[in-house]
Amino acid sequence: MAVFITGGTGYVGQRLTAGLVARGHRVRVLTRPHSIPRVAAGAEPVVGDALDASSYASTLTRDDTLVHLVGTPHPSPAKAAEFRRVDLPSIRAAVSAARSASVAHLVYVSVAHPAPLMHAYIDVRCEGEAAIASAKLTATVMRPWYVLGPGHRWPVILIPLYAIVEIVPSTRATARRLGLVTITQMVQSLVYAVEHPPATGTIRVVEVPEIKRGAGVVSGFSRTGA
């Protein structure tokens, strides 16, 4: 398959790129010039600006799956302005580029919601989802809460609390929706989404429980870097 990734040099993006290349897909990664060395081996760098659709829209084709991973690293309530400056314009640019090229499928990593915190982050991601819906694109929206992996492990201390909260019927659904996923589960689910697009003209929403289940059906996937 032909896959174009924005945010492909980041935490999830590098692993996803490597995984897709290993599975035989043709992968192109949007990158700034100084980040070309961070593009995974076997992928083609495409120099452009994730905030400017015109810088890469002409490189997209109708056969492409566009995976949008651009986002503020280590999001926190203190970064509300950055979400508005980077995260929102980048998904709007991706939607514009996808629509102008009539790409086959857009995959967007949003966030689980509703939630009792991270409201500014959730608001921006919901606006991104709304932009996809307004554009009437064929899309998959992934809604993880927190992705555990190298440099992103502090929430493991909450795992016993999650176990307790899941026991209580009134909080079980919330605990599962806001559950933790591993970087391997996230990447495997993204691979599955790329390889199994939804029906044309529809938007498929993938919540945390489905991310965990989807990760279990990607055969032959390397767990290196989990």
Image (cartoon, helix red, strand yellow):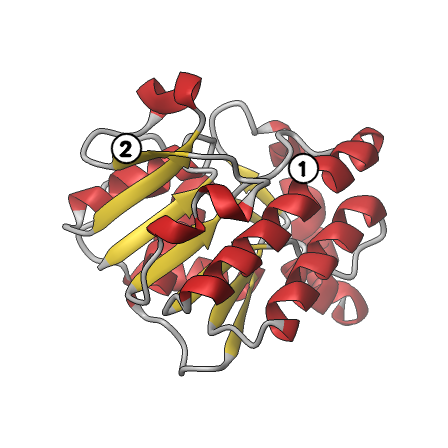
**Residue tagged by mark 2?**
224
Q: Quadrant of residue 85?
A: top right
**Count of marks, rendered view:** 2
In the current view of this chain or complex, which residue is farthest to the left?
24
- Could you tell me how far apart the alpha carbons at marks 2 and 1 are, in whole angstroms? 30 Å
The N terminus - image quarter: bottom left
Residue 103 in the image, given as x and y percentages of width and height: 39, 66
Residue 101 in the image, given as x and y percentages of width and height: 41, 63
Up-down: is 211 above or below 184?
below
* Mark before the other along the chain sequence, 2 or 1: 1
Q: Which residue appears at 35% of the width and 43% of the height?
A: 16
Residue 121 in the image, given as x and y percentages of width and height: 76, 45
Q: Quick check: can you spot residue 189?
A: no
- The kind of residue tagged 1 is Val
Q: Which residue appears at 32% of the width and 60% of the height?
A: 61
Q: Which residue appears at 73% of the width and 59% of the height?
A: 127
Image disc number at residue 86: 1
